[in-house]
Amino acid sequence: MNLIFCVLWCCLCFGALADKVSFLKLVGVGKPNSVATARSLVIENKWFKQKLDHFNPTDTRTWKQRYHMNLEYYKHGGPIFLNIVGEEEMSHHWMTSGAWIEYAKKFNAMCFQLEHRYFGRSHPTDNLSTKNLMYLTVEQVLADLETFINTISNDYEQILLNSKWIVFGGSYSGSLAAWLRMKYPHLVHAAVSSSSPLMAKIDYQDYYMAIQDTISSYSPKCASSIIEATSTINGLLQTNDGVKYVDDKFETCSDMSIYNKKDKALLFNNLAVSVALIVQYNNDNKKKPKSSLSLEKLCDMMLDQSLGSPLERYVAVHKQLRSVNNKECTTINYQDSISALRKTSWNSQNGKLGIRQWMYLMCTEFGNFITSHNRNNLFGDTIPLNYFMGMCTDIFGKSFNINALAKAVKKTNMIHHDLKKKTSRIIYLHGSIDAWSTLGLLQPQTRDSVSIIIKGGSHCSDLYPSRSSDSPHLKKARKTVVYYLKKWLSED
């Protein structure tokens, strides 16, 4: 799963490169916090032949796509569960852990997961050149999934007979799960779509507004302290002495120039993303450093007057985050970031992590650039849209501009409209404090689809392994999923 895009504790766990491009990976699900079992299952990498271009009959090129398989819970007549992996490397941990595995045990399901083209070890082309990335589209990904389902159904025809396929995904892959059910209803019986940002917005300023609302609900003074710290930094960056002070306090990897607006935007973006991730994945059951900050710890530090002014408290928060994630410094050099993202080798760091690939999808299909351009907001007017659109052009070329993206976003949102009106047997789950939920489908208008809002739930919180400390709302959400799966599996 991701989701993801949504973990690779996305931006905080990627080291220096992640600092440069952290806005790109505010989606994803990473790895579950696995619980040791009496008998560990060995999950092997498997591969099957996939078409490069599903929509050009004269193009016969193929490549090897990676997948995982788990027959441990399957009993004759059981369904087939497919976990759709999003914008990250596929992890074998998801084949033995997570809510979907708990459902598989209840329903005696055969389990598969398929790695997303251009991520992890699934390499459709020799490199990640812009020309080659033309085959990285949602339509091609959905066709990959269709081909996989047909291939497995044919290969195991004698065993599976009329078994029903249920697809699962979280964050971006949750969107894929819903879209797959919509496009191929004859193949996919039902879908569980967690924290899926189904709508697309070029300028997604609502994200940080939602983060601000969550922090303010917890502690208005905590939010106001962050606002004050951001404002102070912004003021300091107007003078040479102030720039040197910020460089020193935030331990930047290189010196900032008072005249470089892009470096400043990158700094503000990285600081904002670090705070947002704390809120987005607050108290979930994801595998992450034990000393990671929660919303409670964040606000404890931002309200601790012994640490000094709001700025000094904010500095302390980010110093702890760098320590937790083994970062020596904060990267703020825009040109270095662009140079890293222009590299087209699979062996480049950004290629391995999927950052160049995810940026391509953002610049060509989704947008969803997380901006902040209102002085009264948590992060002020420090992260403008033109910063992100400039990156699209600087990385991929002049044709990757806001006009081209606007057309693509319009197409994506037409699909969203069809989902809302026409598609049945989809469960949409959203956490009430998930800032991505405003892009989700909260009120489907078909009788046989349902939306579940988990009070206090964070991004993809329902996907992770259950635990005794889970909230009553989260436990109820999972029971509701079981109820609908049982109901729908009994239907033709």
Image (cartoon, rainbow, N blue to C red):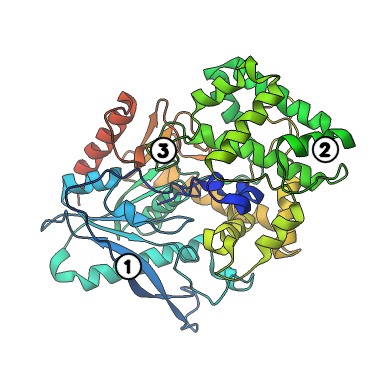
**Circle 2 Cα neighbour tier, 10 Å, few/some/many (<14 / 14–19 / ≥20):** some
Instruction: Look at label 2 and name its amino acid.
Output: Lys
Residue that carries the numbered disc 3 in the rendered image: 444
Going from the N terminus, do you reach mark 3 or mark 2 first?
A: 2
Q: Quadrant of residue 473?
A: top left
Indicate whether 217 appears above or below 136: above
Going from the N terminus, do you reach mark 3 or mark 1 first?
A: 1
Query: Residue 180, can we see it?
Result: yes
Instruction: Look at label 3 and name its amino acid.
Output: Pro
**Distance CA(mark 3)–CA(mark 1):** 37 Å
Residue at the spot x=44%, y=67% of the render?
121
Residue 341, which numbered label? Answer: none
* Foreground: disc 3 or disc 2: 2
Residue 45, which numbered label? Answer: 1
Q: Quadrant of residue 370?
A: top right
**Does residue 179 appear left or right of residue 76 in this picture?**
right
Indicate whether 311 appears above or below 241: above
Residue that carries the numbered disc 2 in the rendered image: 244
Residue at the spot x=76%, y=37% of the render?
248
- Mark 2 element type: helix
